[in-house]
Amino acid sequence: MVEIVELKKKQTNRLTVEKYDEAVKKLRKEHDKMVKGMFEFVDAGPGSWLEFTYRYFKDEPLMTIKLVQGEICDLPMGIVKHLNNTMKKVRRMGTLTEAGPMGKYSTYEKQSRVRFTPLEVL
């Protein structure tokens, strides 16, 4: 007996070219809005800096950004959102009785690594 199964790729809803361009234009406008504020590097002490590369849109060049602890600067809102969502996981080591399936410790805490506070809030 021969069994033939036909697989279909999942149908995805796509925007029209005009709606896509309009959505990208709106997103770029929100992303490029400049915000003045203070950069804090929570993990490090005074005089430290954070350097990273960043590109959000395909047609943008790759940018290298260097921020110094305690510096007041202007950054685009998209980069500010990116910085404020940077977290690290701090694992909590429990006892063997607290270990979940397969001996894994499933508890951890998220801590912020860097912070950019707008001057409007300060």
Image: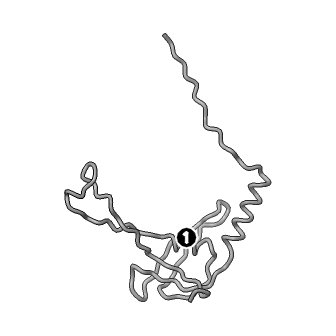
Residue 92, image x and y in percent? 29, 66
Which residue is situated farthest in the right direction here? 18
Image side of residue 68 versus residue 104, left or right: right
Residue 95, image x and y in percent? 20, 61
Q: Which residue is mark 1?
A: 82
Q: Secondary structure at mark 1?
A: helix
Residue 70, image x and y in percent? 49, 88
Asked which colour scheme the image uses, the reply is one colour
Image side of residue 60 versus residue 102, left or right: right
Above-or-below relation of 81 to 21: below
For image coordinates 49% across by 79% down, the residue present is: 115
For image coordinates 38% across by 66% down, the residue present is: 89
Residue placed most toward the observer, 115 or 67:
115
Where is residue 37, by image quadrant?
bottom right
Disc tally is 1
Above-or-below relation of 122 to 64: below
For image coordinates 61% across by 64% down, the residue present is: 56
**Amino acid type, mark 1:** His
The C terminus - image quarter: bottom right
Residue placed most toward the observer, 114 or 97:
97
For image coordinates 77% across by 49% down, the residue present is: 16
Mark 1, Cα crowd under 10 Å, few <14 / some 14-19 / many 20+, is few
